[in-house]
Amino acid sequence: MSDYQKIQYSIENSIARLTLNRPDKRNALDDEIVREFKTALKAAATDEAVRVVLVSGAGKDFCSGADLASLQRISEAGVEESMASAGVMGELFVEMRRHPRQLIAAVRGRALAGGCGLATACDIILAAESSQFGYPEVNIGFIPAMVMAILRRSVSEKRAFELITRGEIITARAALEIGMINRVFADDQFDSEVEAYVAKLASKSASAVSLAKSLLYHMDGMTFETAVEAGIQMNAITRMTEDCKRGVERFLKK
């Protein structure tokens, strides 16, 4: 754990806690923090004790997006360097999508630009009442290009278009209404509500959740018939897991 400089990573009660730890920079993203984030995700993926990964930000904000130094480099970089830099974040989003554990974002304060993308890339977003979300990149002539693939799957096309072209910052309640996030909790109860929510998720079958996540996301782009066929195959696979066998046995004994 001492290897991490810009994040905090710990495991307790089957929950891996991954905290962006640059509160003085509003947890802004740079190459180093993204590398550490990816390293921690890989550790959680291979640790059988982990059922849920809880992603949060230290201090007042979840994440403000790319830091100023990164933005400066983007504006001055050539095509090859820009592609390489974008590729680092793109790879992270793909790894989060493929991760075998549930990834839960606990958002306090602001989740903006790349920070909003990071939250949206998680499987579930829990937000404090006063938190804010948005993709303001258009205001500096930039776009939230890679996260569009995730945002487009979370909200309607019309909502996605509005979010990325207006650059508007929206409230947690507004984000909930459009389906961008999952739950909103009162600020003074946020920590306890998140702990209760995540503890309940951690009690679920690890194999069932992993297989369900894999199937759900692999259905993207499938025809109805292909998706049903994939479901048939996964149904058979799930029946063979020890968790399913024990679960059926418990149910029949009731």
Image: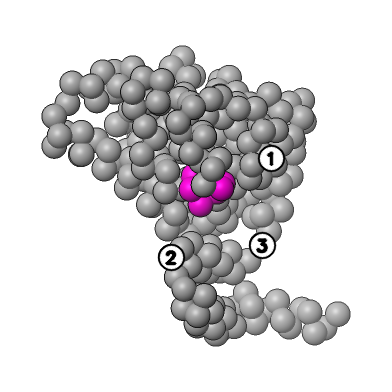
User: Where does the magenta region start and end?
Assistant: 151-156
Mark 1: few, some, or many residues within 10 Å (few <14, many ≥20)? few
Q: Nearer the viewer, residue 28 or 54?
A: 28
Q: Identify the residue position indicated by label 1 in the image.
A: 177
Q: Identify the residue position indicated by label 2 in the image.
A: 221
Q: In the rendered structure, which amino acid carries the disc numbered 1?
A: Glu
Quick one: SS at disc 1? helix
Provide residue 146's location: percent of width, then percent of height.
36, 42
Q: CA distance from mark 2 to mark 3?
A: 28 Å
Mark 2: few, some, or many residues within 10 Å (few <14, many ≥20)? few
Provide residue 38's location: percent of width, then percent of height.
37, 44
Q: Is residue 167 magenta?
A: no
Q: Residue at x 48, y 48 (%)?
A: 152
Q: CA distance from mark 3 to mark 1?
A: 27 Å
Instruction: Give the farthest residue toward the right.
Output: 254
Rendered position, 13 above or below 82: below
Task: Specify the label residue 204 is tagged with.
Answer: 3
Provide residue 35's location: percent of width, then percent of height.
32, 38
Quick one: SS at disc 3? loop
Q: In the rendered structure, which amino acid carries the disc numbered 3?
A: Lys
Q: Are marks 1 and 2 in contact (CB under 8 Å)?
A: no
Colouring scheme applied when the structure was drawn: one colour
Q: CA distance from mark 1 to mark 2?
A: 25 Å
Rendered position, 80 above or below 229: above
Q: In the rendered structure, which amino acid carries the disc numbered 2?
A: Gly
Quick one: SS at disc 2? loop
